[in-house]
Image: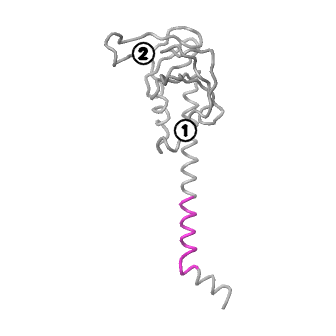
Amino acid sequence: MIVHPDREDVKEVQVKCPRCGVDLQPTERHKLKVSYCQSCKGMWLEHDELEQLEDEVFDFGDRWKGTLVPRATPTNAKCPECAASLQRFRYRFYDLEMEFCPNQHGYWLDDHEDTRVLELMKQEEADLERKLLVEDKWSAMLRHMHSRSFFSRLKDLFGP
């Protein structure tokens, strides 16, 4: 069920699963209220909810997440909100494919793809932490190498 707070004439709209056509049911997954298909186990995330899902495990901000949709191709599935053809894409260049509405209504995730997003973002954060730590250590080593004491010791090692 989709709630439209900006429209007074329509408060709630029952939406259908783009895969099997049954009514999507409101449920909570990973602290988010989503529209869930009890038949195929897929779910519809509103446009901002994918970012909220990622932020459950990724604390570095959007700029470090990488490109969300590098390239997309149309599918036969329809957006539950506007009936536009959903676009299939590889999520942030990973081996995870999902669909989005080209009118920015949201994202369709198949069964357990929300959990996969969390796993990928958790790994991305760990990799980024490691990269930043290595860069800090490298910078410290370069500062030390450029210090006067380092060059003095190096000169003493090789003689006059």
Look at the image and tell me in which quarter the C terminus lies: bottom right
Q: Is residue 7 magenta?
A: no
Q: Which mark lies nearer to you, 1 or 2?
A: 2
Tell me the quarter of the picture where residue 94 sits: top right
Residue occupying the point 55% across, 64% down? 139
Q: Secondary structure at mark 2?
A: strand
10 in relation to 131, above or below? above
Q: Nearer the viewer, residue 38 or 14?
A: 14
Tell me the quarter of the picture where residue 20 sits: top right
Position of residue 154 measured from the top left corner of the image (x, y, whole percent): 63, 82
Residue bounds of the magenta highlight: 135-150
Which residue position holds label 2?
2
Mark 2 nearby-residue class (10 Å; few <14, some 14–19, many ≥20): some
Q: Amino acid at mark 2?
A: Ile
Task: Say whether disc 1 or disc 2 marks the residue closer to the N-terminus.
Answer: 2
Tell me the quarter of the picture where residue 7 sits: top left
Q: Amino acid at mark 1?
A: Met
Q: Residue furthest bottom?
A: 160
Look at the image and tell me in which quarter the N terminus lies: top left
66 in relation to 40, above or below? below
Check if mark 1's residue and mark 2's residue have beta carbons within 8 Å.
no
